[in-house]
Image (cartoon, rainbow, N blue to C red):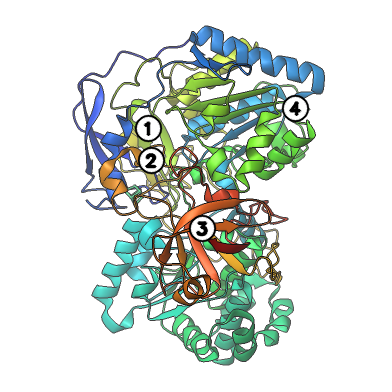
Amino acid sequence: MPRLSLPVRESGWRRSVCPYCGVGCGLSVRARDGVVAEVRADRDHPVNAGQLCAKGALLAPAIAAEDRLLYPLVRSRETGGTKRVSWDDAVQRVATGILDAVAEYGPDSVMLYGSGQLMTEDYYLFGKLAKGFIGTNNQDTNSRLCMASAVAAYQLAFGEDAPPTTYADIEQANTFLIVGANMEACHPILFNRIKARKRAGGDRVKVIVVDPRRTKTAEIADIHLAVAPGADVPLLNGLLYEAMLGGWLDGKFIAEHTEGWEQFRSVLPRFQAELVEAATGTPAQQVVDAARMYASNGPALTFWAMGVNQSTSGVDKSLAIINLALATGNIGKPGSGPFSLTGQANAMGGREAGGLATSLPGHRSVADPCHRVEVEAAWGLPPGSISPRRGLTAIEMVEALERGDVRVVWIACTNPLVSLPNSDRVRAALERADLVVVQDAYHPTETTQVADIVLPAAQWSEREGTLTNSERRVCLLERVGDPPGEALPDWQIVCAVAAALGHGEAFDYPSSEEIFDEYRALTRGRDLDITGVTYDLLRRTPGVQWPYPKGAEAGTERLYTDARFPTPSGRAVFNVPQVLAPADEVTAEYPMVLLTGRVKDQWHTRTRTGKVPKLNRADPTPFVEVHPDDARALRVRGGQLVRVTSRRGAAELPVRVTDAIRPGTVFAPFHWGALWGGGSVANSVTSEAFDARSRQPELKFAAVRLEAI
Ligand code: SF4
């Protein structure tokens, strides 16, 4: 087995990046006795300039939690008990399981499911092993739940998955349109920058928030459009129609740099403000006012996140946002652009390194024969080694497990029994697998509890690697401390399994730097070319924004400044977004709509933040937000338990009564799993219906009924 190099023991202050959200705040980190002891905001970092939210500031206790996984474990299916085994034994068992499945059922019987918390080097190696050497494109990630719809929309509109904007646009924007993103809770440092811009800009700076809830983000809005859940496309098209009627579109930009306008324009009269009011519950006058504010007040920057993406029409909603930016010329210029926020620290890196079931490294596609040949050559494989079939995505993995098509599943750095929708179904599906391998830094989690083999992984500060934040900034996370027990960096675990599968030569890396060098060579000539980026450069800088080709002297702050787009025509494309109803039907039996989301001080399934007492103070338990009118009708009060039931399952949650939510709509955070929430998991209730193009599930709309317990 590979081993880490010499222990760190004591370290001076080292540069790092917060491993939680896609903001990517810079950190200074110091270790004592090999363990992270102090974490501070990097005052010189362009992203956060000395600020951190509580999660980032309290990283040290999360890393030192008592339930860190120290040794490989195997579980007996008969007794349910686990026993410690050696790394050699564990790796051999994983390899044998994969080899047996491939021999009996073919390579597509194996599935690798990762996370936006993995480093780019890990993503790259998982993909190399699955797509190049096992022979399956069944590699997906929990980032599928986060930003897949935005990826598909960027590709359709611009020809590539390339977010055009930069955080520095915040200080130059006059109008902020924030759609389906509770930035105060989920991207707090960027939200602080927006607030600072609003303070500095006075009356000139305006904020419009589109959200069914009056979140703390919405509280700073000049206009809060409390749209009905799922009705974003009519609202966004309505804004565009009103902007057109007001004469605020950029006709020159549309004529010279876009295509598809006439076809899109022909549908816009269906979105008169009065019709939009009927479809979305948003007052017509607010629609008119918001359109004027967005389109006539100078540069406008649009942020969006899961409230848009997690939908069966997530791609259409994202396209409607992009159309609005294109029609008003809000792209490629300071202070403007459509800016999708990534949820996780390295969701972007996964997109770049080929971490999705459809992709290969360097924004390549498994469906493109030239791309496959290029990657096969780089990996020393004969032509035809990489399958042309797209692999299974997250929800399709569950369906394939149920059918018996997938027999071995290897999960890394994520806890799908809490985070995937319809979690009871996910549990039953995993129980059907011949072999479940889970690689994690903590045990137990809800998912390690059902694993046959549990592999201990190093945490963010205990290994080296790179990530890319929401503004395309590639950063290096230096190794600061030592992994506990026998934990290893994820990339070393992949290499060990690859060697046991007989591919040791292709996975013989002395360090993560060599993996990065191999990966960056594959970006040459691509839209995200980072051939000029080295670990040495990243050690000397707070990261650089791609593209950064060899010979470049600086990163690329903003894309499309020349209004040239990487489409066949060189023009951006207006796509006509479809108006689709959510998949779950609201009926007399299920008369309300459940939205799920996050709270500020917790991260994902609380495997880290749940161990930090200070982070548990604000929200010590799960809850469901209910409007006072609904609470009266249900005869429930704050703190009382209700059963939230959908067509899939039920969760019992304490009520929070608040008029910040629309009547008929309820909200529950998804963080609490069975280990923490008294057995109730919000995702027992949610829907696994997904967008046909992005395959991102509709976590933002489940028809439910509530009953007092
Ligand atoms: S805003 Fe995000 S990246 Fe910054 S400290 Fe908070 S969780 Fe970490």
44 is higher (above) or lower (below) than 519:
below
Contact, CB < 8 Å: mark 2 with mark 4?
Answer: no
Q: Earlier in the sequence, mark 4 or mark 3?
A: 4
Q: Which residue is mark 4?
A: 109
Q: Of the residues shown, which amino acid type is indicated by label 1?
A: Trp
Label 1: element kind: helix
Mark pair 3, 2: CA separation: 39 Å
Q: Find disc 3 in the rendering and name its residue.
A: 709
Q: Compute the Cα span from label 1 to label 2.
A: 7 Å
Q: Looking at the image, is 624 positioned above or below residue 236?
A: above
| Residue at x 48% of width, y 84% of height | 290
Cα–Cα gap, marks 2 and 4:
32 Å
Tag 1 near tag 3, CB within 8 Å: no
10 Å neighbourhood of mark 1: few (<14), some, or many (≥20)? many
Which mark is nearer the camera, 1 or 3? 3
Q: Name the residue that disc number 2 marks.
A: 19
Q: Amino acid at mark 3?
A: Ile
Q: Amino acid at mark 2?
A: Pro
Q: Nearer the viewer, mark 4 or mark 1?
A: 4
Q: Position of residue 317 (x, y in %)?
A: 61, 67
- Please tell me the numbered disc located at residue 460: 1
Q: Nearer the viewer, mark 2 or mark 4?
A: 4
Res 223 → quadrant = bottom left
Q: Residue at x 38, y 50 (%)?
A: 621
Q: In the shown orientation, is residue 524 left or right of residue 365? A: left
